[in-house]
Amino acid sequence: MDPAPGWSAAFGRDSIKHLEQDLPKGGITREWAWEGSTGAGIKVAVVDSGIDAGHPAVGAVAGYAGIVERDGKIAVDTQPHQDDYGHGTVCAGII
């Protein structure tokens, strides 16, 4: 009797296909990955726990939208706010 649950069958040793690596000549380099792109003109949004816009790893923050509850109703707060857990600031710093 197979001790693995039925949903795991797709991941069994005989089910997983072997894929050959298809790397660029010379390996993966910064130049290969970026292909000359700079990110100029790109706008991004971080949907997370907030962003500490004063953190040195975070660039310019153009706007805020926090979902809050006011008087028993859901509202959008567009005032600058802090990061409640730190995760959003880390994501913004990476971006």
Image: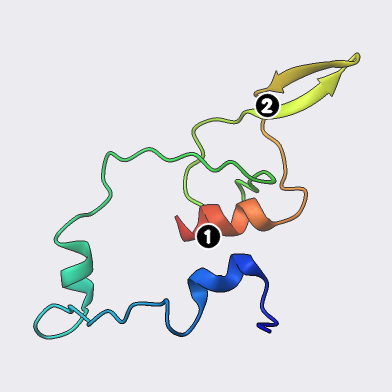
- Work out whether residue 61 or residue 67 is closer to the camera in this orientation and state it: 67
**Amino acid type, mark 1:** Ala
Q: Residue at x 53, y 52 (%)?
A: 92
Above or below: residue 12 compared with residue 56 = below
Query: Under tag 1, what secondary structure?
Result: loop
Which residue appears farthest toward the right when viewing the image?
A: 71
Q: What residue would you read off at disc 2?
A: 79
Which residue appears farthest toward the front when viewing the image?
A: 1
Disc 1 + disc 2, Cβ < 8 Å: no
Q: Which quadrant would the N terminus be assigned to in this image?
A: bottom right
From the top left corner, tell me how far across and down residue 53 is, in percent: 60, 46
Task: Judge left or right: residue 17 versus residue 31.
Answer: right
Query: Under tag 2, what secondary structure?
Result: loop
Task: Judge left or right: residue 68 versus residue 25.
Answer: right
Distance between the Cα atoms at labels 1 and 2? 21 Å
Q: Residue at x 26, y 45 (%)?
A: 40
Which residue appears farthest toward the left when viewing the image?
A: 25
Earlier in the chain: of badge 1 and badge 2, it is: 1
On the question of residue 73 being in view, the answer is yes
Q: Residue at x 22, y 82 (%)?
A: 20
Q: Residue at x 68, y 30 (%)?
A: 66
**Amino acid type, mark 2:** Gln
From the top left corner, tell me how far across and down residue 54 is, in percent: 62, 49
From the top left corner, tell me how far across and down residue 90 is, in percent: 59, 59
- Sort mark 2 into few (<14), some (14-19) or many (20+) by Cα contacts within 10 Å: few
Q: What residue would you read off at disc 1?
A: 57
Above or below: residue 70 compared with residue 88 = above
Q: Which quadrant would the C terminus be assigned to in this image?
A: bottom left
- Sort mark 1 into few (<14), some (14-19) or many (20+) by Cα contacts within 10 Å: some
Task: Judge left or right: residue 72 versus residue 54.
Answer: right
On the question of residue 55 being in view, the answer is no
- Work out whether residue 37 or residue 2 is closer to the camera in this orientation and state it: 2
